[in-house]
Amino acid sequence: MSEVPMGESLLFLTDEQLRQGIEAMFFAYRGFTAAPDQILDGLAYGRAHHRALHFIARNPGMNVNRLLAILGVTKQSLNRVLRSLIEDGLVESRIGTVDKRERHLYLTAQGTELEHRLSDAQRRNMRAAYRAAGPEAVAGFRQVLDAMMDPEMRRLCAALREGAA
């Protein structure tokens, strides 16, 4: 039996290998969200609140339409999440200076503290996994994730990485 180079064998994955990859993604996501979920549960918030806090923290002053595009949720769903975050003093909504119809979003000090608590555990988790896997695996993992995104999400993710979103 001849050896197939590792890169080439990945091009011909069996259905079973793909199923195992899908399951690994599900379980990895559970592990990735477990610590934040515990914190959120104690505050009567969910993952949508965490995602909103994360992206507002990464892009202070972003408008609501931009957040809608990033999260890919309905306006009604995002309004529910933002209303609770604003009422609880975690997010501040400011009227746009150029366009008065726009609402720009900022974390308050309390929102920043909660976002750090939620994301710190995820950063520790990612850092440990990246260190264990090594730089080549990390680069490959990013390539796989990028390839799984549709072109618009890939563009949006690249813009976020560059700080342009």
Image (tube, rainbow, N blue to C red):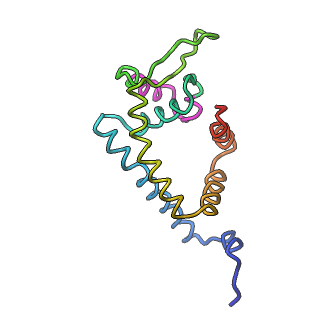
Looking at the rendering, in which quadrant would you find the C terminus?
Answer: top right
Q: Which residues are magenta?
A: 67-83
In front of the other: 63 or 151: 63
- Residue at 67% in and 44% down: 154
- Residue at 55% in and 29% down: 67
Q: Main secondary structure of the magenta part?
A: helix
Q: Is residue 5 left or right of residue 119?
A: right
In front of the other: 107 or 1: 107
Q: Is residue 78 left or right of residue 1?
A: left
Q: Position of residue 102 (x, y in %)?
A: 58, 15
Q: Position of residue 58 (x, y in %)?
A: 55, 33
Q: Is residue 75 left or right of residue 115?
A: right
Q: Is residue 157 left or right of residue 57?
A: right
Q: Residue furthest bottom?
A: 1
Q: Position of residue 51 (x, y in %)?
A: 47, 37
- Residue at 43% in and 30% down: 112
Q: Residue furthest left?
A: 42
Q: Quadrant of residue 27?
A: bottom left
12 relative to 28, above or below: below
Q: Position of residue 134 (x, y in %)?
A: 58, 63
- Residue at 42% in and 37% down: 116
Magenta highlight on residue 81:
yes
Looking at the rendering, in which quadrant would you find the N terminus?
Answer: bottom right
118 relative to 13, above or below: above
Q: How many marks?
A: 0
Magenta highlight on residue 17:
no
